[in-house]
């Protein structure tokens, strides 16, 4: 993240102290429970379906 966004995720933005990596949570149930406990939305949002690319105009004006 530091190279891409220029944000050091392991440094506190308020006081500048170092943070420790504790765990990576990958269980959907555990993530939902944590978000609900924090009173944050836990429902998955479905992305909109992809749209077709814009049509290029291929009309030629000839002599």
Image (cartoon, rainbow, N blue to C red):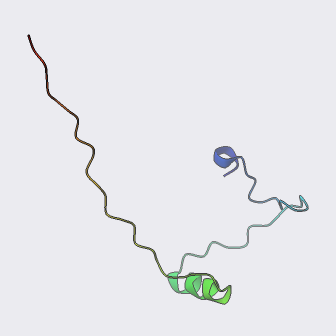
* Quadrant (top left/top right/bottom left/bottom right) for the C terminus: top left
In this view, which residue lies farthest toward the top? Answer: 63
In this rendering, would 1 be left or right of 32? right
Front residue of this view, candidates 48 and 25: 48
In this rendering, would 49 be left or right of 31? left
User: Residue 20, located in which quarter of the rendered image?
Assistant: bottom right
Front residue of this view, candidates 15 and 61: 61
Q: Is residue 46 above or below residue 10?
A: below
Residue beneath the point at 67% across and 44% down: 3
Residue beneath the point at 65% across and 86% down: 39
Q: Position of residue 10 (x, y in %)?
A: 77, 60
Q: Position of residue 33 (x, y in %)?
A: 59, 88
User: Residue 49, located in which quarter of the rendered image?
Assistant: bottom left
User: Residue 57, located in which quarter of the rendered image?
Assistant: top left
In this rendering, would 10 be left or right of 41? right
Front residue of this view, candidates 56 and 6: 56
Counting the numbered discs, the total is 0
Q: Position of residue 62 (x, y in %)?
A: 10, 15
In this rendering, would 9 be left or right of 33? right
Residue beneath the point at 81% across and 65% down: 19
Front residue of this view, candidates 42 and 19: 42
Residue beneath the point at 62% across and 82% down: 40
């Amino acid at each position: 993240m530091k190279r891409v966004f220029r944000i050091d995720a392991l440094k506190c933005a308020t006081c500048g102290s170092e943070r420790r990596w504790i765990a990576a949570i990958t269980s959907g149930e555990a993530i939902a429970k944590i978000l609900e406990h924090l009173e944050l939305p836990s429902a998955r949002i479905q992305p909109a379906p992809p749209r077709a690319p814009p049509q290029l105009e291929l009309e030629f004006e000839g002599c």
